[in-house]
């Protein structure tokens, strides 16, 4: 559906290829590109070959139909008699080949150790440490200092692989568990490649599905960019209204697709110099309702050498197929198993019979052990308001967040929860993705999630950055049909599930949003 217009009009071949060629030329002896040392041959349209690795501009002979293309670099027709120089060259080639295969072996071992699965061509070696970020890619000391201050000591697997990919100017789509550090995996290469502030216009755009996530990413980006005067802007409603974009100084723009599109349309925001485009929570951005906005932003980013990347904890096959057709020579990176929950979360299913049983179960759960901060997810904003009305007179500090609140109210709800002033935050799926609340002890799915992706993202608000967390999912008779799908996610991340659930039939899960009775004890009391 979306592929008819998404990313259309982007030409990615020869021009971009020329850039690759020049990059290979400049990196003859670097460790990360052993593959390019000797045997990179590129076939042109008319069947001739360019020897790009050695910077040899001269055209070689036309390919003979009997040649095995990938090995043709080792063949020579009309050979001159061998001399010393030839011997020397040949030994260099074989040394290069040996080193190349040794490097491939090291890469494979490292990927196996960290559960990194990749596919694509000429994939840069994974990084082992922050030190290597400096030695291999000349990472500036301000960034390393900021990382040390943030307490980042070791790279996470997604960072090990995605950072060198993006630094090498390659496009990628990446799927890694919630809370595994995907944000830094795309912010780091952007900051490194942009080097310093400039007045050349916007050079990086990061799209997030919600303004809360955009605000969080902007804040993280500013923390990482400290000591370097980048212009990092969050696109707010106010900014769209008031700014003169022709004078706006901005290196990195972070926004929802809706706001950037509005700025492009109303205010002629110029995105033609964007070098990096990140679609965070990409599967959400590709959903109906957002995909058209994303598409117009992608089109506005018309720089032919742009590097685009997709990140999410869930990557449905449909999105992956779409990504494959539209991205240029993209590398696929999956950490662990695709579409699985973080293994740091203890997951539990609790049967509550009917809707009425839920409130009882929740109060009982809080009475037995309320270990804040706790996040409670419900199906929609009406139910969020109803549950908040029920709990606000209980002896707990409870707040609510949903899309009927204005920007400031939503911001306050998030800030108070972060600061520990709110113990229990009732939420719709508006904060189910990407939000990084440190140390959430428990996520309660008061209403059963509407898809397994929603389940993975919701419970992923706890158990982040290696910490442990807990997730409790309440279910009623009406939800039973969908239990198996959640149970599959649970078993894949090592949690136990009763065998009767695993023997339920597998369902193709369309959005499960049943009509649910209002959350209220008041009506009943009044009736009695
Ligand atoms: N290398 C690291 N060392 C220590 N902490 C890290 C590292 N990288 C990221 N973090 C921290 O881990 C937490 C989760 O990171 P982040 O929000 O990027 O996760 P994510 O993979 O994007 O999750 P989600 O899928 O929910 O969006 C953050 O608090 C971040 O500061």
Image (cartoon, rainbow, N blue to C red):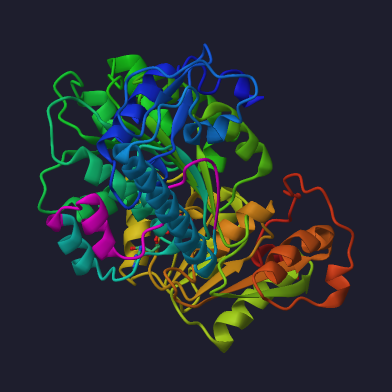
The residue depicted at 77 percent of the width and 73 percent of the height is 351
Q: Nearer the viewer, residue 528 or 206?
A: 206
Q: Nearer the viewer, residue 97 or 450?
A: 97
In the rendered structure, which segment of residues is drawn in magenta? 117-142
Which quarter of the figure has residue 419?
A: bottom left
Residue 117 position in % (x across, y down): 56, 56
Residue 146 position in % (x across, y down): 18, 61
Is 107 covered by the magenta stretch?
A: no
Left or right: 17 in relation to 44: left
Q: From this viewpoint, is residue 347 visible? A: yes
Which quarter of the figure has residue 372?
A: bottom left
Residue 36 position in % (x across, y down): 39, 40
For this orientation, the residue located farthest to the top is 46
The residue depicted at 36 percent of the width and 64 percent of the height is 128
Which quarter of the image is occupied by the N terminus?
top right
Which quarter of the image is occupied by the C terminus?
bottom right
Which of the four quarters of the rendered structure image does ligand 1 lie in? bottom left
Task: Work out whether 97 lies above or below 307.
Answer: below
The residue depicted at 27 percent of the width and 61 percent of the height is 132
The residue depicted at 72 percent of the width and 71 percent of the height is 491
Which quarter of the figure has residue 341?
A: bottom right
Task: Work out whether 220 lies above or below 43.
Answer: below
Is 130 covered by the magenta stretch?
A: yes
């Amino acid at each position: 559906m979306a592929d008819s217009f998404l990313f259309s009009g982007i030409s990615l071949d020869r021009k971009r290829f020329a850039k690759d060629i020049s990059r290979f030329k400049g990196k003859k002896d670097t460790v990360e590109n052993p593959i390019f040392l000797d045997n990179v041959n590129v076939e042109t349209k008319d069947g001739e070959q360019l020897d790009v690795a050695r910077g040899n501009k001269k055209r070689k002979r036309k390919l003979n139909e009997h040649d095995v293309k990938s090995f043709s670099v080792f063949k020579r027709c009309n050979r001159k008699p061998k001399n010393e120089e030839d011997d020397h060259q040949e030994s260099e080639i074989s040394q290069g080949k040996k080193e190349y295969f040794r490097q491939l072996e090291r890469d494979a071992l490292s990927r196996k150790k960290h559960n990194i699965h990749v596919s694509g061509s000429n994939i840069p070696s994974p990084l082992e440490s922050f030190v290597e970020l400096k030695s291999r890619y000349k990472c500036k000391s301000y960034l390393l200092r900021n990382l040390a201050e943030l307490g980042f000591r070791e790279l996470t697997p997604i960072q090990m692989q995605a950072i060198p990919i993006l630094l090498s100017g390659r496009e990628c789509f990446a799927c890694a568990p919630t809370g595994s550090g995907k944000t830094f995996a795309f912010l780091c290469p952007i900051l490194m490649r942009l080097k310093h502030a400039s007045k050349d216009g916007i050079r990086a755009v990061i799209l997030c599905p919600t303004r809360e996530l955009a605000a969080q990413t902007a804040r993280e980006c500013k923390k990482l960019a400290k000591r370097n005067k980048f212009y990092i802007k969050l696109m707010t409603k106010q900014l769209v209204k008031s700014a003169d974009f022709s004078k706006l100084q901005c290196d990195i723009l972070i926004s929802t697709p809706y706001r950037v599109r509005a700025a492009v349309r109303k205010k002629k925001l110029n995105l033609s110099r964007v070098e990096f485009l990140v679609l965070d929570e990409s599967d959400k951005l590709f959903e109906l309702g957002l995909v058209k906005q994303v598409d117009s932003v992608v089109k506005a980013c018309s720089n032919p050498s742009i590097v685009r990347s997709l990140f999410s904890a869930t990557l449905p096959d449909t999105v992956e197929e779409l990504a494959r057709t539209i991205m240029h020579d993209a590398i696929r990176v999956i950490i662990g198993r695709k579409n699985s929950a973080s293994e740091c979360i203890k997951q539990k299913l609790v049967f509550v019979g009917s809707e009425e049983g839920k409130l009882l179960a929740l109060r009982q759960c809080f009475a037995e052990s309320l270990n804040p901060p706790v996040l409670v997810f419900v199906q929609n904003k009406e139910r969020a308001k109803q549950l908040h009305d029920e709990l606000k007179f209980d002896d707990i500090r409870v707040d609510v967040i949903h899309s009927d609140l204005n920007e400031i109210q939503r911001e306050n709800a998030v800030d108070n929860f972060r600061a520990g002033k709110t113990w229990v935050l009732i939420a719709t799926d508006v904060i189910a993705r990407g939000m990084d609340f440190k140390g959430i002890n428990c996520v309660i799915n008061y209403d059963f999630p509407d898809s397994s992706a929603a389940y993975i993202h919701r419970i992923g608000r706890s158990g982040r950055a290696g910490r442990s967390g807990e997730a409790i999912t309440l279910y009623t008779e009406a939800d039973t049909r969908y239990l198996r799908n959640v149970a599959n996610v649970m078993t894949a991340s090592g949690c136990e599930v009763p065998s009767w659930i695993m023997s339920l039939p597998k369902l193709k899960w369309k959005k499960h949003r049943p009509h649910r009775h209002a959350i209220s004890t008041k009506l009943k009391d009044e009736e009695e």
